[in-house]
Amino acid sequence: MIKEKKILVMLVAIAMLGSAILLSGCVEEKKENKIIVGTSADFPPFEYTDASGNIIGFDIELITTILENLNYTVEVKDISFISLIPSLQADKIDVIAAGMTINETREEEIDFSDPYYQADQSVLIKKGSGVEINASHDLENFTASIANLTIGAQTGTTGADWVQEHLINTNMMDEENLKLYEIYIDAVADLDIGTERLDAIVLDLDVAQAFAENENREVAYTIITGENYGFGVKEGNTALVEKINAELEKFIGSDDWTALINKYFE
Ligand code: ARG
């Protein structure tokens, strides 16, 4: 009897040890399957934080769905926009999901997924601030009307590039009248204070519209730039890009896609 009990105890111990080894194997595997998504959560409705501090938004939900379909566990990290590409290159993050426009300069540094969203730039102002913009669709009249303004933009964005190219490089505007902000929240706060701080912000149209849901702000102009957003991965990580593209192709146009658009753009 006692002998049998001892054997039983030993068997149980062996079984427990075995499952512990199996479990630790699982944990290891999970770690390997984890993807860190970097974003700059100041860009509603693409990426922003809810009242409890969770990072949410169109990009976040889209990339999370895609990566989970590919059996990855996803962690989202909030990083300033300008640090996203260096973080990817330093393997601190695996994917960029930040409403990032695919362009030549960036394509020299990282690889992009296929485009998932089309965007233009715009000018956001404070209502009643007296800032007047020539909204005629003649680029020359329009640029002349904003050249004397103090304009804000996020560091390293295509909005900042647009001001640099069309206003500063053309000698229409003083370089010091372009104020660069690390996060949009700070630019919008300055806009809200008034023209003693900032007259206008040049930023992506959908995001300007989201900020203009506050009745004190308005979108004064759309600058057609025809940009495309893509997800960024480390240069040469072709395997991951191809997997993301295959999922994107399945997802775009599906019912879930429509639901996602309606959730964030209505
Ligand atoms: N589309 C613009 C760009 O690529 C702005 C992106 C800003 N994104 C953000 N999450 N703050 O430069």
Image: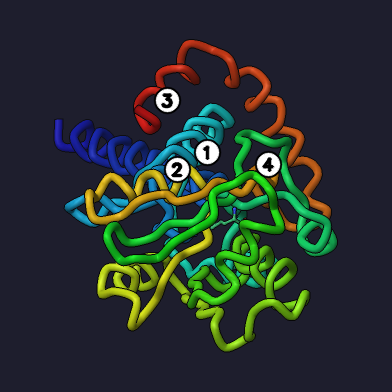
Counting residues from the start of the chain, the first of labels 1 and 3 encountered is 1
Relative to 58, say whether 211 is above or below: below
Whether label 1 touches label 2, CB < 8 Å: yes
Q: Secondary structure at mark 4?
A: strand
Work out how far the residue at label 4 is from the one at label 2, CA to CA, in angstroms: 17 Å
Q: Is residue 21 visible?
A: no
Q: Secondary structure at mark 2?
A: helix
Q: Secondary structure at mark 3?
A: helix
Where is residue 19? Give x, y as percent.
Answer: 39, 39
Work out how far the residue at label 3 is from the one at label 2, CA to CA, in angstroms: 11 Å
Residue that carries the numbered disc 4 in the rendered image: 228
Residue that carries the numbered disc 1 in the rendered image: 63
Decide which of 250, 220 is in the foreground and name it.
220
Residue that carries the numbered disc 3 in the rendered image: 260
Where is residue 246? Give x, y as percent.
Answer: 71, 25
Where is residue 196? Give x, y as percent.
Answer: 33, 83
> Badge 4: few (under 14), some or many (20 or more) residues near its Cα, within 10 Å?
some
Work out how far the residue at label 4 is from the one at label 1, CA to CA, in angstroms: 16 Å
- The quarter of the rendered structure image containing the C terminus is top left
| Residue depicted at 30% across the width and 66% down the height | 129
Q: In front: mark 3 or mark 4?
A: 4
Give ligand 1's quarter of the image.
bottom right
Amino acid residing under circle 3: Leu
Q: Is residue 232 left or right of residue 51?
A: right
Amino acid residing under circle 2: Ile
Q: In front: mark 4 or mark 2?
A: 4
Residue that carries the numbered disc 2 in the rendered image: 60
Counting residues from the start of the chain, the first of labels 4 and 1 encountered is 1
| Residue depicted at 60% across the width and 41% down the height | 119
Residue 87's tag is none
